[in-house]
Amino acid sequence: MRLSHNLASLNVYKEYSKVLNKQSTSLGRISSGYKVSGAKDDPNALAQSEKMRMQIRGLQMADNNIQDGISMLQTAEGGMDNITSMLQRVRELAVQSGDGSATKDDKASIQNEIDQMLKGIDDIAKNTEFNGVKLLNDTSINDNSKPNVMKMCIGANTDENISIPKYNFAFSDVNVNCLDGTVMNFSSIDVSKPGGTDKALSIVDGAINEVLKARSQYGAIENRFESEITSVNEIGDRIQGAESSIRDVDISKEILEYSKDSLLSEAGTSIMAQTNKFPQQVLSILENVRR
């Protein structure tokens, strides 16, 4: 027994301090929900978790991009549907102008309606946009068989994108590739002139063909977008599950650890109370010697 140094009490206090630190760690994990909240907890696990979080956030933003892409293509599809309907009406009028019984005034009236329909087609192409992006009026295009493309990112990594073509269906500003291989402009349509009906039909048929090709391509891309949404969400969920197993705490396990440490803490407090009485016992011995 020593008077100056109560080694028993110091040893108990050392273990008691360790238990308190473990309790503090358990409380921090339970309150935050993370077993790895900083680099000191597990440097390797933290690095893995952060890389996974980078992928997860990238995939979440890719999902938003795909949703925007679908909405943009649906907007373009609506514009092209109206353009197709108006081109069909122009074709009907062109066929009507070929009626041999039609007078000059009749053909002038038909041409006037055709002109109005062509202006309406231009207006639709120029005014159809999504967030300021014009897919149907790319003014840098003179030939719709060679469209420009815009990139839509659909993944969390580089080179994960889809090319979306941009056209110019303001036909007053662009040449039309006719089905017979000739190239003409809408300004050539004049059913009031001799041979105007055949020329108008050739131009309109070429224009309808170009619009239908674009609609088909946009429809295929929209279907791909919808498939990509499923893929991106599936990959994101799996990565999130893996990241959770690395970083998230098992609450039930941590509560068991905390309960165990609480018992050890109480036991340590009780034992320290006993060991702190050792010096007093030394004094009692000395008191007996004195007597």
Image (cartoon, rainbow, N blue to C red):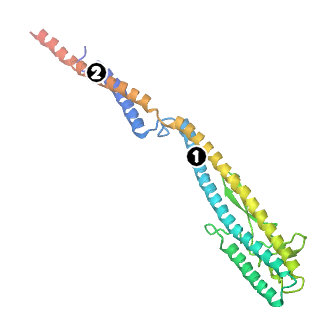
Q: Secondary structure at mark 1?
A: helix
> How many other residues sit within 10 Å of disc 2, few (<14), some (14-19) or many (≥20)?
some
Residue 182 lies, with reference to residue 104, above or below; the image says above
Numbered disc in front, either 1 or 2:
1
Find residue 72 and report its image quarter: bottom right
Is residue 157 visible in this depiction of the protein?
A: no
- Using the image as rendered, state which of residue 93 and residue 286 is in the foreground: 93
Q: Tell me the SS state at disc 2.
A: helix
Residue furthest front in the image: 101
Find residue 61 and report its horizontal and vertical position in percent. 59, 53
Where residue 252 appears, as percent x and y from the top left, is 42, 30
In the depicted structure, whether residue 241 falls above or below residue 102:
above
Q: Label 1 sits on what residue type?
A: Ile
Residue on which the image places disc 2: 9
What quarter of the picture does the N terminus occupy? Answer: top left
* Residue at x-position 79% and y-position 78%: 93
Evaluate whether residue 63 shows in this view.
yes
Q: Amino acid at mark 2?
A: Ser
Q: Position of residue 267 (x, y in %)?
A: 29, 21
Residue at the image point whose x is 79% and y is 63% from the top: 213
Number of other residues with Cα within 10 Å of mark 1, as a class: few under 14, some 14 to 19, many 20 or more: many
Residue 237 is left or right of residue 287, and the answer is right
Residue closer to the observer: 290 or 61: 61
- Residue under numbered circle 1: 56
> Quadrant location of residue 22?
top left
